[in-house]
Amino acid sequence: MKKTNREKKEWQKRKQLKIINKQIKATNKSSGKKVITGALIISPYMLCIYDDHYYEDAINFFKKISRKILKEKKKITIDFSRLESVTAAAILCLYAEIHRCIQLSEIDHPIRYIKPRHAEPRRVLNELKFFAGINNPSYDVIHEGTIGVIPCTSGTKADNKLDDLMNSIENNIYGGEINEEGDNTLYRSLSEAMLNVWQHAYKSSRIKKDEIDRLGKRWWILGHRIEDNLYLAIYDRGIGIPEALPFKYTKEVIDKFLDFLKLKNRSDANMIHAAMEIGRTGTGKQGRGKGLQDVRRFVEENPSGVLRIYSNRGGYVYRMEGDKIEHHSRKHSLRGTLIQWNVKLTNNSSEIKNDG
Amino acid sequence: MTVKTINIADEFSKVPYGRYPDDGENNGERFRNEFLVPSLNEFEKIIVELDGTRGYGSSFLDEAFGGLIRKNIINKENLLSKLEIVSKFESYKLEIESYISEAKPEPLK
């Protein structure tokens, strides 16, 4: 099969990288310098989970990190030097993976980093307090961000964090000028996303008890403003929406919604889509909220709003413009759920410069 | 007519959140049991002012208001006649009414 230009480019980069790695190893060996601690894990040059192609590279990268630290019990050095481009969602997943590995590892300080050589990813990672956050033992602290940034942070129960987070979003993203209606819908979406993590994400014996004991029913969050767009993402390492749905609803209810949506199988993407609709139309089941529907509310009030939900092997992208839904099916699981809201900020707040 | 006004932001929390006590301190069940139920028992009319908080998720609203019907505290007709929701956002009033209308009393144990 003929290679596409992108595949050719990537193949060339991989080849170059192998040569560079050999050179690094040879230099270290000859000079006796201990630059690299433990196993060397090299980041992809593009850290992104939106695009199907880059997604697999990112997942393999995350898996290598946890395998080395948690299974092989080795120290590692993560080499970000070739990193050229990053996206908020992928940074959040990586942050969570590293945080989890550090917390669960039996080794002290299992990870060292080589920072990106390229200015843009270095700036973004620094702004999001990626390295500072990971190196800080109190992960639950909401780091003070600069204008346009909600730094990587994590927590378990939402109620003691929500107000601080909302203040942080209001000040850093909206310059203190979020309107009350926007504030209400953001709160609704964010708080119900956190509640879903608390109530449903870790509800299975598949998640080891020891992991929940040590990490709690944890979510990770970050926000980034790029020009007039807000990207706000929350991630958990739970069982994922496709696996959680049968805990909430019977097979008959789920099948009814899949049929109604003309979705032919129980692929992860279809299950996420069904979960969104079950929330929207109700099921007659008592005491069930409209949690995922609430999650969508924040983008529904924005003409160019986009909601992305990636859970296990599925992806669901909802675009307000044209009321469009996209599905993504992936080979490897994200091992959890990522929800990202992307909204265009209003005129008031767009006057703030993203110069922090 | 005896009237009780409850301002959620001032008297309960600015960050109402969750359905059950396990979800967090400022949950819908606690608001229902500590504020709505005593007021419904004591007063002929209750006015609930929603504005001033960060907002509300559906879980909180459903448990607080729909829960009154599910838990057999009061019947729908009485509740809708005694309850007045005050908010600058009309959507909250409609939403709460829908939770009350959709709720079904749970069988008594």
Image (cartoon, coloured by chain):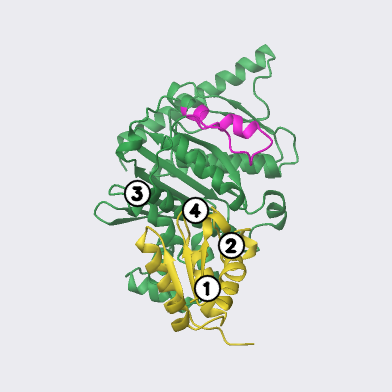
Chain colours: A green, B yellow
Indicate the secondary structure of the residue bearing disc 2: loop
| Chain containing the residue with disc 1 | A
Q: Do callouts 3 and 1 mark residues in contact (Cβ within 8 Å)?
A: no
Of marks 2 and 4, the one in the foreground: 4
Residue under label 1, please give it: A287
Identify the residue at the far top of this view: A31
Horizontal arrangement in the rendering, residue A19 relative to residue A65 (left or right): left
Compared to residue B6, the image places residue A87 above or below, namely: above
Residue under label 4, please give it: B53
Compared to residue A29, the image places residue A218 above or below, namely: below
Mark-to-mark CA distance, 2 and 4: 13 Å
Q: Can you give x and y, in whole percent of width and height, for residue A302 in the image?
A: 31, 49
Residue under label 3, please give it: A306
Magenta residues, as a range?
A124-146
Q: Do callouts 2 and 1 mark residues in contact (Cβ within 8 Å)?
A: no
Mark-to-mark CA distance, 2 and 3: 29 Å
Within 10 angstroms of label 3, few (less than 14), some, or many (20 or more) residues? many
Residue under label 2, please give it: B27
